[in-house]
Amino acid sequence: MISRIAALVVLMLMVGGCASEDILSRLQIENKKIDGFTKHFAESRFLITENKHFGVELLMPDDKLTAPEDWMYLVIHDSADRDVAGADLSVVARNPETGTTRQAGIRDEGGGLYRITGLRLGRGAGWEVTVKIMHQDKSDSVIFPASRN
């Protein structure tokens, strides 16, 4: 499971034209367990949803939610730490200073990996990203704050 997700992310970055030595060098496998969920990448953000149904890992090109690049990836696991493929997702970025919101495009890459596009958050004030997940009979959400806690 770990190597498949890592390989998919590297492949998507290369095929998508977003790959650079800097981005690829940041993909360090961590494989850390957090409350029963796996966090795959050392540099990613990881949160557990409000009702603890899903673990969500956010991989992006910048440490803050101000990246102008038009991509992010989500890795999603269920409460049994299985890949969540085929989920219905909603990803919305919100600028806390202005109240501006942007809806993301989402593509299921398989194996619990989702490519997020179309946000183009830009520099300046940070954005918070809300991820809503519906999979099988579970519905839950998580908010990634503008800066790391």
Image: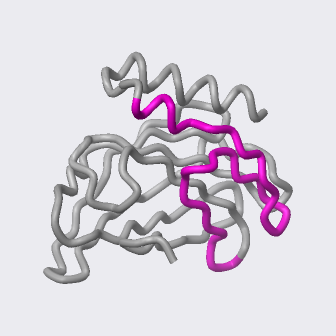
Image position, residue 103 (x, y; %): 27, 58
Furthest toward the top, the residue is 15
Residue placed at 69% from the left, 78% from the top?
51
Image position, residue 87 (x, y; %): 58, 49
Q: State the scheme by which the image is colored.
A: one colour
Residue placed at 61% from the left, 67% from the top?
47
Q: Residue 96 lies in what quarter of the image?
A: bottom left
Left or right: 115 with respect to 44? Answer: left
Residue placed at 27% from the left, 70% from the top?
126
Q: Is residue 98 above or below residue 24?
A: below
Left or right: 100 with respect to 74? Answer: left
Quadrant (top left, top right, bottom left, bottom right) of the N terminus: top right
On whether residue 36 falls in the magenta region, the answer is: yes
Q: Is residue 79 above or below residue 61?
A: below
Q: Which residues are magenta?
A: 22-51
Residue placed at 47% from the left, 64% from the top?
131
Q: Is residue 5 above or below residue 55?
A: above
